[in-house]
Image (cartoon, helix red, strand yellow):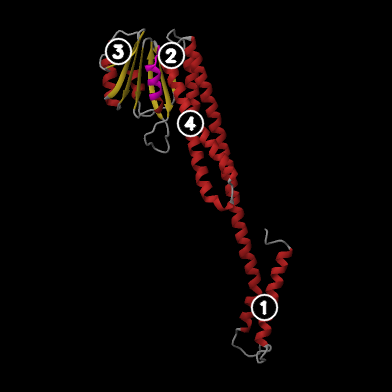
Amino acid sequence: MSGFAWRIDGSGATQVPVKGALSCGADFVWVHLSTTAEHAQAWLRDEARVTSIVIDALTAAETRPRCERMADGAFVNLRGRTEEELDSSDMLVSIRIWATRGKVVSVTRKQLVALKTVTQDVERGAVRDPGDLIAAFAAAITEDLDPVVADLGDWLDDCEQKLDVERIFALRRGVTRVRAEAINYRRFLSPQRAALERLAALPGDWLADDDRAHLAAAADRAARMAEEVEAIRERAGLMHEELSDLRAEQLDQRSLLIAIAAMVFLPLTFITGLYGMNVEGLWFAKEPWAFDAIVVLCAVIAAGTVLFFARRHWWRG
């Protein structure tokens, strides 16, 4: 099992060993575990001495953002980005937090990008209590996700400007990717906003007024991003339909050219097929000028057919 612990009191923040961190007598202790469920369960049961409900919540395999009041504390599950490779259907990793007066225990299975930012906040003394820590996580996660969501919108803006029949297939692949990512982010941003709002409204004196204000601000930012990814998803859907229409129009144009070519050569095929029969009785079959006459006739028919379609503007669809 890997992890770290911070002891925070009036003299500042000091990193301490995980073993025995919760019993060091500091004003506030934060223990973070990066581990599998089996190792975390043993430490939570033997060292932290938390209830089985809290242990199950902190080590659950499948999670989504939520906030629940448990005994004299609260359990919070948030989702953020990671630099580790993930399944394409689950682009965010969870951090499970159990907070009560004077202590916070957090558990992750994969490295959270926002964890580094929060650790830096602890080192410089910006975190003094559980409320500060959770607010720091909420702010760091939303701040980290904000440019990612903005990049999706910027990509769609570029795509709209480069909309062209010749780039349909490349654009459709990109739009499908953006739409899938927007749907994936939306799955977690909406419940994350609800979880932060619920946490900000939880009763308990371990959450100060400024902590609640910071949590409300993070919830508002998560709500804004959820609305933005919803707009991106809808824009991507409309753009996908537009690209499909362009593709259908391209196919119609090509089908029209094939139909015109067929109409041009249909009478020519009839004439050449008729005079290609090896039978007696064909008009002017014995005349020396018959071949030249048939060639001229085919040319006139072809030119007339092309001129007819051109005057009716069929070439432009």
Judge whether residue 135 can be spotted in this image. yes
Q: Position of residue 291 (x, y in %)?
A: 65, 86
Amino acid beneath label 1: Cys
Amino acid beneath label 2: Gly
Give the vertical position of 203 relative to 97 (above or below).
above
Disc 4 or disc 2, which is closer to the eye? 2
> How many residues crowd mark 3 within 10 Å: few (<14), some (14–19), many (20+)?
many
Q: Please report the residue visible at 66 percent of the width from the left and 75 percent of the height from the top.
A: 267
The residues colored magenta run 116-131
Q: Say which mark, if any, is on residue 187.
A: 4
Q: Position of residue 307 (x, y in %)?
A: 72, 68
Magenta-colored segment: predominant secondary structure? helix
Q: Nearer the viewer, residue 120 or 146?
A: 120
Inspect the magenta stretch and tell me whether residue 126 lies in it.
yes
Q: Position of residue 212 (x, y in %)?
A: 49, 13
Count the numbered circles shown. 4
Q: Which residue is mark 3?
A: 22
Amino acid beneath label 4: Arg
Label 3 vs label 4: CA separation? 35 Å
